[in-house]
Image (tube, grey):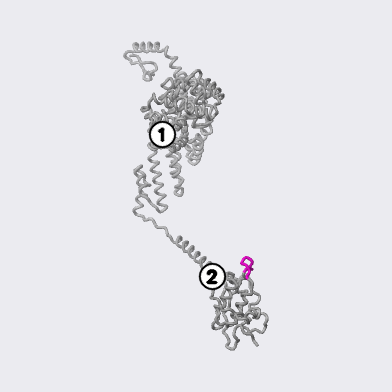
Amino acid sequence: MARDASDPRSAGARPSPRGGPRCALLVLLSLVAAAPLAPPLAHAAVDRDAGAAAPASSALPELPRLAPIARPEPDITAVRELDRVLDQITSQDARARENARATLDEPISGIVDAVRLRVQDVRGSIDRDAAPRVLAEARREGRRALKGDKGGDDAPDGKKKGAEAKDDKGAKKGAGDEKDDAEGDWLDFMLATPRPRDSAWSDVVKLLAMVRMLAADGTTPAVRELIALHAYFGELLRIDLQRQVAKLRDKAVPALIEARQHDAKIVQRWANKQLDLLGRAIPGEAIASNDTQILADVLRAYGRVRDVDAMRVILSFCNSDRARLRDAAREAIAAIGEPGVWQLRDAYLNLTGEKPPREWSWDRIARELFATYDRARLAEVYELMDEGVAAASANKLAEATDAFDRVLARAPLFERRKEMVGPYVERARSMPADRREDALAMLRKALRLDPTGEHAPKIEAEIAYLEGVLLIDRGTPDKFVLERAIELDPGHAGARAALASLGDKVAERKSQKNRYIAAGAVGFAALLAMFFIARRRSDPAPSAKQPSAAPPQPPASPGAEPPRTQASAAPQPPAPPAPAPSAGQDNAPPRQAVASSDPALSPGQDSAPPRQAMESSDPALSPKQDGEAMASSDPALSPRQDGEAMASSDLAPSAPASEASPAPPVQPIEPAEPRDDGAPEAGTLSR
């Protein structure tokens, strides 16, 4: 059999000397037969050369895959919370229903999956004949209440009828329903006419409550469940679902785009109508949102429905500076696939100025396009990467790692990051012993760049070894990390040596002497502070006002009581009344006046404190009580002296407490001198 000319085994083969003419004839025939195939083969070779020259120094990026719609199992906590709310809102207690109604507007974590589970339960138990009647009766009662509150004004209803009829585009029944319920909430209508014992009423209330909870969540999965409710229950909840979609606006657009390809035709028509009402029917309008998450969901939704008309809009986000939008757009391109090949060719031509080869499939064109986008956007990053690679090849590890650090700062998920692992590891191993912390950081960075590579176990072993050495240096050795290093890399000599040294060397315990000295100094300072504070408190406070000249103190009599100070003075019980003074005693002048008018008094009498000082020192006593107390506490006084004291107290006017002058400060009393036997008695005049 003759070999083809393109077969490398036939290139340069010499004919055998035995059948020379025959072999030459066969070769000639094969060349003639392969002549028509030469141009295509030449074109293919040219295309292969062009394809090899098109990509840059790096490999083409892989196309991201669009993740399918996930429907995880509901969380048991969310299910219990949902059951609690539904039980309260359908209970017989009016207060419980009000509290449950107030909680429906608060988003609950994991509520979407729980609602999907409970909707299936209601879907199987609801009475599809009784439920519409119960809802219609509640709506009728609600409309009556609204008309009564508005005073029967039907003019606004007429305007709303025209607006709703325009939105419904000829659906008379739907327009009438929307006109009737233009104001008011269906759930409020149902709660206004409670029938807790009616199963149809309970099922409708539960459905309306779950609709509010999904609307409060406001995410794309929540709107998907709202659309599924329309597929399950049809016209029963259609108007209420339209109201919730109108409130959500842009948040409902991604799920409505996906609903265009729903299995139910009624849902497809309803979704197209809602997009038209929201003004998001075409791709150029659907992306008019400032929310990055909503915009990313819109791009993925176009990818799921494989809308070729949206290809050009999606391609405009494939080079976005926001990574979330860029990834979503590329996932959508990969999901649309072959139907969008011509849009991809046009985009490649507009970007590079050259047509892509014919043999390139849509995925090859997309990868080339994305690689060109990345190089244009990350031109500086690629320059830094090339500088780092050149420095690493020249064994300039410090310069190489510095360049790689700047690359990772600009693009943490750079596609050539695996090329950085080797320089980082070599730089870590070349660091001295006093920079083990920096070496450990280098190794951890290298492991994050390629956690599943062939060198990952050795890098992990080196990390464990450095951690063990650092623990030994700190005085807290740990054999586990060293054993882990040997387990990952059995040939690691450093880990074996460090583990063997732990059995021979005992780590010296650090001295605690400095800590004890510091604690003692603090305690001694505290004791000194306490001593000085106690000494200051024990010193007597100086008097506020010192007298100019202290009067002489009277000698102490045997039966006399020392003068009372203000601190020791206290109200005394009233003494028994003294006998009435005689006529001579009544006419006698007061003791105080006699003492002040006669300068020839004895020293003891001159030094006696005046009555006014005693009264001011004890303002609680009245003048009469003071005299009685003095009479009862001084038995040495004669009856005449007692009477004189009482007379003086009776003659003194009693001033009210509010007009009394403030008491002067009490002076300290010095001890009395011993009494002289020759001194006259107290209260007598010297002759």
Q: Where is residue 218 in the image (x, y as percent from the top left)?
A: 47, 32
Magenta-span inclusion, residue 660: yes
The kind of residue tagged 2 is Ser
Q: Is residue 499 above or below residue 326?
A: below
Q: Which residue is drawn at 42% across and 35% down?
A: 89
Q: Kindly identify which residue carries mark 2.
A: 538
Q: Which residue is drawn at 61% across and 67% down?
A: 657
- Which residue extends farthest left? 18
Give the residues drawn in magenta, as a range: 654-662
Estimate the spatial distance between the alpha carbons at disc 1 and disc 2, rounded to whole Å. Answer: 76 Å
Q: How crowded is mark 2: few (under 14 residues within 10 Å), some or many (20 or more)?
A: few
Q: Position of residue 60 (x, y in %)?
A: 46, 28
Q: Position of residue 229 (x, y in %)?
A: 42, 26
Q: Where is residue 30 in the image (x, y as percent from the top left)?
A: 38, 12
The number of discs equals: 2
Q: Is residue 10 left or right of residue 670?
A: left
Is residue 527 among what the camera can see? Answer: yes
The kind of residue tagged 1 is Thr
Q: Is residue 178 left or right of residue 626?
A: left
Q: In this view, does 382 lie above or below 564?
A: above
Majority SS type along the magenta span:
loop
Q: Quadrant of the N terminus?
A: top left
Q: In this view, does 655 lie to the left or right of 505?
A: right
Magenta-span inclusion, residue 34: no
Is residue 56 among what the camera can see? Answer: no
Nearest the eye: 395 or 141? 141
